[in-house]
Image (spheres, rainbow, N blue to C red):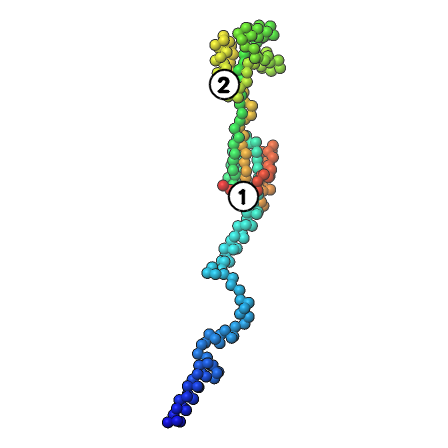
Amino acid sequence: MRLFVFLLILANLLFVAWTQGYLGSSPDPDALRVQQQLLADQVKIVARDEPPPESGKSEKNGKEAEKKAAEVCVLLSELPTTAADLVESLLADKFADFKAARTTVAGTASYWVHIAPLPSKQEVDNKVAELKRLGVADLFIVQESGPNNRAISLGLYSRKEAATAYLEDLRTRGVKSARIVERNGKLSSAALEMRGPEDRAGALRQAIAELLPESKPVACKTPAASPQ
């Protein structure tokens, strides 16, 4: 009986020693892996639940940036509208890789209220005296050579409505010979901003010079960007 108890105690001691790894093995396989790690304290996490960047996408972004950097903007300003049409046709035919943005500048006009030129200085003096009797003191005699010499200017207006209203006022005073003539101060013009590849800008400038010898292409004031 004592031998049996002794063997039972010895078996329990051996089992405990085996479970604790005293006999050269361990029931926990991860414990051995931890011992085999090299420089575990220097491991760094570079991403958390994020996929690595796609190499193809990075190359595409690089090419797009390079393309934008190689763009140039050429400006033509104060062009007659017919000349702007010619340049746009040139772009469509030979420089389709350039995109043009057109800006139109409206012309300015004035409306002249006056009495047409009189044959002699004496008649001008007589008309001026008559106008003053009718209460028209704001006038000017044109004394420069040309078709309007010896005309009597009664006012210059930027809006036709204002000129018409003054003409009606003159007629109520008895001035029947006054009239309105429209005078163009500056015709309408256009500006073109042409954006495209820098390596084609020289050819474009040469083609514009041949088409419009008086034109002066310059660089745009703002940096080249994607066309609208």
Q: Position of residue 197 (x, y in %)?
A: 56, 45
Amino acid type of the residue that numbered disc 2 sits on in the rendered structure = Ala
Asked if one can make out residue 94 in the rendered structure from this viewpoint, the answer is: no
Amino acid type of the residue that numbered disc 1 sits on in the rendered structure = Ala
Pair 2/1: label in front: 2
Foreground of the two, 10 or 153: 10
Disc 1 crowd rating (10 Å Cα; few below 14, some 14-19, many 20+) is few
Residue lying at the far left in this picture: please name it.
Answer: 1
Task: Say what secondary structure mark 1 lies in.
Answer: loop
Q: Position of residue 21 (x, y in %)?
A: 47, 81
Foreground of the two, 135 or 66: 135
Q: Residue at x 48, y 83 (%)?
A: 22
Task: Say what secondary structure mark 2 lies in.
Answer: helix
Q: Residue at x 52, y 55 (%)?
A: 59
Q: Residue at x 57, y 33 (%)?
A: 77
Q: Is mark 2 in CB contact (under 8 Å) with mark 1?
A: no
The residue beneath circle 1 is 225
Q: Residue at x 57, y 6 (%)?
A: 129
Foreground of the two, 70 or 160: 160
The residue beneath circle 2 is 162
**In the depicted structure, whether residue 68 falls above or below residue 57:** above
Disc 2 crowd rating (10 Å Cα; few below 14, some 14-19, many 20+) is few
Q: Quadrant of residue 156?
A: top right
**Disc 2 or 1, which lies upstream in sequence?**
2
Q: Position of residue 204 (x, y in %)?
A: 57, 40
Count up the numbered dots: 2
